[in-house]
Amino acid sequence: MDFGKKYSTVLKNLKKRYNKLLLTTPDLAEVLGITRAGVSLRYKKKWFHLLPAFLVLKSFKDRDRLAFPLNEVAKFLTGEKLNEDEYPSILGTHGDILRSLQEKYDKHSLNKMELAKELDISISSLSLGISRGDDIPAYRRRHSKNGTLFFPLNEVARYLADVQHTKIYR
């Protein structure tokens, strides 16, 4: 799949095609033209030089879930190198992530389905994480103790900004 040769063009085309901040393993496999097993093998064998920089998101089923920031995939495809001082902001700052989420959803909070899609986990995994008290974005309930959950965009952006500071692998 050809996304262009210049970094800015590749990044724009990736954003247009996938419309999210983080690519999943199947998405990356499609971009690189390899199988999902190929991506997983590169991770398991620690062949990190054959993968873009990635995050290991906490998984609710004791499996590592890899997430690849769009700008890192674009740098990997164009051959640009990441400077050491760029590590803290691979996804962008809290403000950048918040603006991106506001543009995408045009509202102030996400429901469970939307959050699960952003984190690339299933709704049942998210529900399990909530019941176990796992590390998820802060949420609020509407109306009562058993009311509908909603996740303020500010808290989701803060969560994504915090995750990226601690779990970046090259």
Image (spheres, rainbow, N blue to C red):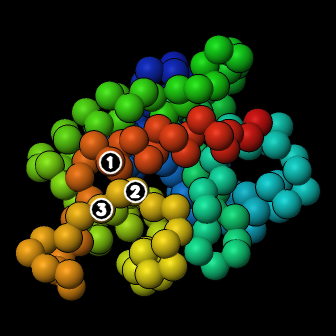
Question: Which residue is under mark 3?
Answer: 139
Determine which quarter of the picture holds residue 37: bottom right
Q: Residue shown at 63%/25% (left/top)? A: 87
Q: How far is mark 1 from mark 3, CA to CA? A: 8 Å
What label does residue 86 carry, if any?
A: none
Residue furthest front as drawn: 145
What label does residue 137 carry, if any?
A: 2
Is 112 situated above or below 164? below
Crowdedness near tag 3: few (<14), some (14–19) or many (≥20) residues, C-alpha within 10 Å: some
What label does residue 155 carry, if any?
A: 1
Is 50 situated above or below 36? above
Label 1, secondary structure: give it: helix
- At label 1, which amino acid type do we have? Glu
72 lies left or right of 170: left
Label 3, secondary structure: give it: loop
Pointer 3 with pointer 2, Cβ within 8 A: yes
Residue 101, x across and y down, in percent: 27, 43
Pointer 2 with pointer 1, Cβ within 8 A: yes
Residue furthest left as drawn: 143
